[in-house]
Amino acid sequence: MGMEKQVSGSPILFMNTFPKNYFDKYYGGTDIKNPLQKLDFYRRVIIESLPELQKHIKLLDIGCGYGGFLKTLEVDKMIATYGIDAGDYAITYARQHTHRTKFWVTTVKRFKTNIKFHIITAFDVLEHISELDSALYRVSSLLAKNGRFICVVPVYDGIFGRIGGLLDTDVTHVHKRSRHFWRDKLSEQFEIIGTYGILRYNAPLMGYVHFASPSLSAWGQAVLFSMKKRRAV
């Protein structure tokens, strides 16, 4: 199908920009910052996107990490799941803990496939990509007609965003931008059809706290954008 070679145990060294120590440092090992509450919210957003689409859905998760989100979708037989990540460590783990998802070690710009996806997701990924315009163009080109792109980005405006910025030590975050920047940038390639503001914090006694609501869009420390591929002119 013209796809880049699947992971088969041999590391693709030039792609391995997010090794084990990166995930351990910033994400607390395997899934501390991806509790079921958070993944279930992502899954609900996906399900809400399905009515206008066909019954057999192909979904690609960009920057899929350990594959926890894709695993929650595997119970739904109408969704075929695919994942890519720049780190072979995360993909190796993901392949061992999922059942029918196909994975590749690659970036969205290097990913080569003939598949057109009905839904593409990118949760806390775009802020890592330096060549943002070309990456978003590539996302659009991978989407089927009427396809959906759903992403989450941290934002650094507003009181909670500024606090989050002070706590953010991830040096791979090359875009520390406002929600207005992201809305304008994403609108260049996609039609935004919905937003959720997100409040999240790794609390010492409560664990990882994650609240999401459309009413938080103006002041959450992260924003989920639900989008539709623009029609070709």
Image: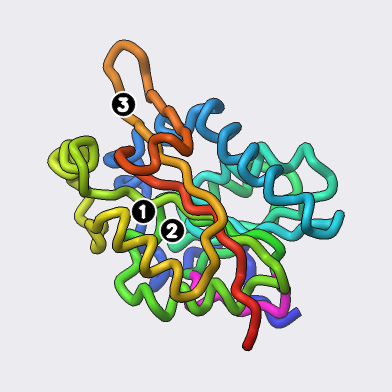
The percent coordinates of residue 206 (x first, y second) are 35, 14
Query: Would residue 223 be found to the left or right of residue 39 on screen?
Result: left
Query: Would residue 158 be found to the left or right of residue 185 on screen?
Result: left
Query: Would residue 67 be found to the left or right of residue 203 on screen?
Result: right
Q: Residue at x 56, y 56 (%)?
A: 193
Label 2, label 3: how far apart the Cα atoms are: 24 Å
Mark 1 and mark 2 residues within 8 Å of each other at the beta carbon = yes
Q: Residue at x 31, y 58 (%)?
A: 180
Amino acid type shown at disc 3: Asn
Front in this rendered view, residue 18 or 194: 194
Amino acid type shown at disc 2: Gly
Mark 3 and mark 1 residues within 8 Å of each other at the beta carbon = no
Residue 4 visible in the shown view: no
User: Magenta stretch?
Assistant: 108-116
Front in this rendered view, residue 49 or 133: 49
Amino acid type shown at disc 1: Pro
Q: Secondary structure at mark 2?
A: loop
Pointer 1: residues within 10 angstroms few (<14), some, or many (20+)?
A: some
Mark 2 and mark 3 residues within 8 Å of each other at the beta carbon = no
Q: Would you name the residue on which mark 2 appears?
A: 87
Q: Would you name the residue on which mark 3 appears?
A: 202
Q: Residue lying furthest left in this view? A: 166
Q: Is residue 217 above or below residue 228?
A: above
Query: Would residue 62 be found to the left or right of residue 186 on screen?
Result: right
> Image quarter for residue 150?
bottom right
**How many labels, in total?**
3
Q: Would you name the residue on which mark 1 appears?
A: 19
